[in-house]
Image: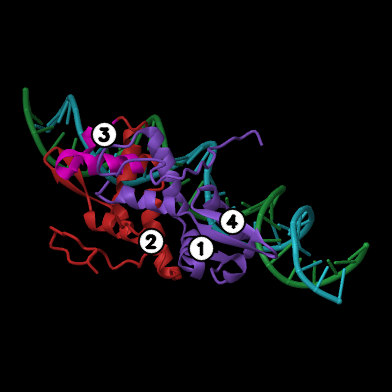
Chain colours: A purple, B red, C cyan, D green
Amino acid sequence: MSNVETLPLQQPDVTPCCPPLTERPLSAEEAVRTAAMFKALGDPVRLRLFSLVASHEGGEACVCDISDVGVSQPTVSHHLKKLKDAGLLTSERRGTWVYYRVEPSMVAAMGQMLGTRG
Amino acid sequence: MSNVETLPLQQPDVTPCCPPLTERPLSAEEAVRTAAMFKALGDPVRLRLFSLVASHEGGEACVCDISDVGVSQPTVSHHLKKLKDAGLLTSERRGTWVYYRVEPSMVAAMGQMLGTRG
DNA sequence: CCTTTGATTCGACGCATGTCAACATAGACG
DNA sequence: CGTCTATGTTGACATGCGTCGAATCAAAGG
C-alpha cells in the first residue's frame, strides 16, 4: 500500500546492474540491486522452480507441471511471484494455464558478475 | 567440452555441486546445497564484503581494510563468518590482523550453474 | 604483567520471510 | 448461467536473520 519498494525494472541489455565482483568493490546501491537477484535464488524451493522452468522443453513451463516441490500450491505461486518480481521469470496466461519463462538477460548478468571476464 | 579454457589452478574440477540450471531440474538436496551459496550473496552487506575482498590487491583483504560498509564491526565479522561458512571465503590470521581471501572454485561453480558462456 | 588495539562471540531486539488454510479470481465447458 | 478446475491473493503464524552493545579472546608492546 504505502510501501513502494524497489520496482523490478527490466532492461533489455545484459548489464542492467554491475561489473564483475572481482573487478571493483560494489557501491551500496549496486549491492542492494545485485543482492536482490541472488536472494531470489537463495531459497531451495525457488531454485528448484527456476531450474524446472529453465530446463523445461521450449524454455517454458506451466504451474500444472510443477507439483512435487514439497510445498503447497499457494506457496509455489508465492515463490513464482518473487522470481517474477526479481525479473528472473516472466509469466503469460494462455487459456486455462499460466506459463512461466526465464529472462535470459538476467541470468546472463548474474553469470557475468561471477565470471572474471567482463 | 572446451569451456575450461585456461585453468592455471591445479584444481581440475570446478566443484562437485550441481549442473547448470538450464540443463536439468535440481533435486531437493541439490537445491538446498546450491541455495546456500546464493543466499550467502543475497545480502547487500555480504555482497559488498565479498566484492571488496575479491577485488582487493593480492586477492586478499584484512578486516581493518573494511570499515565503510555502513554496519558495525561485529556485524562485519558476523557476515564474514557467514561467507566463510558458505565456503566462499577463507580466513588466515597473520600477526595482528586477519586476512580474507576468496575461494575461486566456489565462484566458478556458481558461474557455471548460471551458464557463463561468452 | 598490564595496557592497547584488533577481531570474534554472546545476548537480545525487531523486522523480514517462508508456510499454510481460506478465500477470491479467471477461463472452460456443459 | 452455473459449476468445475486452475492460479493467484489475503491473513496469520512461526521461524529466520540482520543488527547492535557488551563481553571475550588474541596479539603486540611498554
The amino acid type found where label 2 is placed reads Thr
Q: Secondary structure at mark 3?
A: loop
Q: Secondary structure at mark 4?
A: strand
Residue placed at 41% from the left, 34% from the top? A29
The amino acid type found where label 1 is placed reads Leu
Residue B73 is covered by the magenta coloring = no
Question: Considering depth in this image, is A103 or B69 the residue closer to the camera?
Answer: A103
The amino acid type found where label 3 is placed reads Ile
* Whether residue A111 is situated above or below residue B97 in the rendered picture: below
What numbered label is drawn on residue A91? 4
- Judging by the rendered image, the residue that carries numbered circle 2 is B34
- Judging by the rendered image, the residue that carries numbered circle 3 is B66
Calculate the distance from the C-alpha at mark 3 to the C-alpha at mark 4.
Answer: 41 Å
Question: Considering depth in this image, is A38 or B115 the residue closer to the camera?
Answer: B115
- Mark 2 vs mark 4, foreground winner is 4
- Judging by the rendered image, the residue that carries numbered circle 1 is A49
Residue placed at 53% from the left, 68% from the top? A69
- Mark 3 vs mark 4, foreground winner is 4
Residue placed at 17% from the left, 47% from the top? B92
Residue placed at 43% from the left, 68% from the top? B26
Calculate the distance from the C-alpha at mark 1 to the C-alpha at mark 4.
Answer: 13 Å
Question: Considering depth in this image, is B8 or B100 the residue closer to the camera?
Answer: B8
The amino acid type found where label 4 is placed reads Ser
**Picture quarter containing residue B112?**
bottom left
Q: Are the two marked residues, 3 and 4, in contact with CB atoms closer than 8 angstroms? A: no
Residue B45: horizontal and vertical position, in percent? 37, 39
* Circle nearer the N terminus (1, 4): 1
Q: Please check whether the numbered discs 3 and 2 fall on a single chain.
A: yes
Calculate the distance from the C-alpha at mark 1 to the C-alpha at mark 2.
Answer: 13 Å
- Mark 3 vs mark 2, foreground winner is 2
